[in-house]
Image: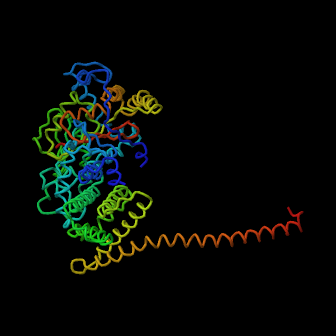
Amino acid sequence: MALRLLSSRRRLGSIVLSYRSPLASLHSHATSFGFQQVKEEEKSKLVSNVFTNVASSYDIMNDVMSAGLHRLWKERLVGKLSPFAGMKHLDVAGGTGDVAFRIFDAVNSVKRRALRKVDEASIEETQIYVCDINPNMLNVGKQRAAERGLSDNRSLVWVEGDAEALSFDDDSMDGYTIAFGIRNVTHIEKALAEAYRVLKRGGRFLCLELSHVDIPVFKELYDLYSFQVIPNLGELIAGDRDSYQYLVESVRRFPPQERFAKMIGDAGFEKVEYENLVGGVVAIHSAIKL
Amino acid sequence: MYRTAAKRLLGAGLTTSRLLRSTIIPSSYTSNLCTSSMGHTEFSNQSGPTAAGEGPRRKPRPEFEEEQARVLSASLRHVARLGWTEEAMMAGSRDVGVSPSIVGSFSRKEAALVEYFMDECLQLLVDRVDSGLDLQNLIPSERISKLVRVRLEMQVPYISKWPQALSIQAHPVNVPTSFKQRAMLVDEMWHSVGDGASDLDWYVKRTVLGGVYSTTEIYMLTDDSPEYRETWEFLDDRVKDAFDLKKSIQEAKYFAQDIGAGVGKSFQGLMNGVMQTMSTRGGRSSSSF
């Protein structure tokens, strides 16, 4: 894959502290809606509006904005997860089900192979929970499941919920993924703490998110693309310039790779790593709960 | 050069088993490229022989590595049944009481299991040697034989699935690590035999022993004789050849020199003849240029 040439892994050696103190910057994430300043209580409502507006054209816009690359990124995410049969997985902010469907496919193709070798009682039901705060996004997901003939399948469960206050039990999940969702959460550290809470010992946390680019010339090109092209695309295709303006701004406001990795570590996770894809446009952070 | 260099640098007080413990264990299942452990500022380092110089003050390993080691160790029990596969590792993780998801975090999954096993065997070998494997009364070729035999016997419980392990080790992605592990194994063996040389001979010795070890390992895969008797006979023959080989290499060198001298003379003669022919021809038809 051409992506491999551009993907690079970085070590968390010396952490470059930003000029703001960590608390202040977290607070600023909670009160930032893109480049605007908003009240904390209002942020989640504003985000909710954004996603209600974009739900129906979410998938098309993803394809257009990333030139189809988002599929490869999600494949990579699921590849890193290495799903297995009998797994209990939670995909947060996964409204339209992209990641969930991929995990479902991976498990069911692996399952057939593994059934020959698998031992006794581990043929439990695989459960993939898709959790999203926005019911419109979930509906799109359910629709897509119906199109694939999976609407009655017991493995996929669609749940409405808030990443900061999950309705699942402690130590109940083998895997937790959040793809392009953590940026929209008001309090990142709460979402991370919840992730830590619901994961079993040995469970993995994986986060796919738009992130910061540092490569000199590429950074300028990316900024140009983000601020000039994307909002116009949003207007053209989805009829909603503001939501996509929010999107590109929120990417800039999100903590960079190293700092986000530190936050994950602070939540209690071990072996925190991240992998940059396309030079940093997207980053996959992974960690284990032990 | 590992142990011999270490001894030279740090003096005889260094216990070699401690040295190896700190250098071996990080190599196999820490993903060297980018592992970062938050909340732990100390990595189990790979900086070489100097690492474990200070005895009891060994750096603590990050917890996830210990957990991974525990999972791998438990997985070995399932290898005979499930092979060197993710299923074995998942079964191992269930034994330890950890979610099978952790298998996804190993950088090269099955290879991690095989490499862990190789490291464990090397450590066992070192321990056996240190705790008095009887080598004193044997001549060098017999000592080598015995060491290789001891090491290969550790693989007997897994012999039915060992071809799979070998093929995993042969994957291009895994070759660097498996090569390094075998190099360390061979170095360790020569060192136990008592060889302290660090000249050019070092490479020859290790390459030869590497070859002997690998061929014996493969021979063992198809051996049905009781207690692998035929394998040990094969091993003894190969070791004998290897020790003769050293003499043969020397002889071959001299032989080549002689031949070279002879060939050189005749080559020179040939070239002279060619030059003469060309000059006479050139004189007759100089206008053809």
Answer with left or right where residue A199 lies relative to residue B235. left
Image position of B208 with respect to A194: above or below: below
- Residue B65 visible at all: yes
Considering every residue shown, the one lying at the far left of the view is A169
Q: What colour scheme has been applied to the protein in the rendered image?
A: rainbow
Q: Position of residue A157 (x, y in %)?
A: 17, 46
Q: Position of residue A269 (x, y in %)?
A: 20, 39
Q: Name the image quarter holding residue A56.
A: top left
Answer with left or right where residue B272 lies relative to residue A21. right
Q: Which image quarter is the C terminus of chain B in?
A: bottom right
State the residue in front, A131 or A271.
Answer: A271
Image position of A195 with respect to B244: above or below: above
State the residue in front, A284 or B62.
Answer: B62
The residue drawn where x is 76% and y is 69% is: B272
Q: Position of residue B99 (x, y in %)?
A: 16, 50
Q: Which image quarter is the N terminus of chain B in?
A: bottom left
Image position of B17 with respect to A250: above or below: below
Answer with left or right where residue B205 lies relative to residue B227. right
State the residue in front, B90 or B126.
Answer: B126
Image position of A248 with respect to B66: above or below: above
Callout count? 0
- Residue A147 visible at all: no
Q: Name the image quarter holding residue A288.
A: top left
Q: Position of residue B108 (x, y in %)?
A: 30, 53
Q: Name the image quarter holding residue A265.
A: top left
The residue drawn where x is 35% and y is 56% is: B180
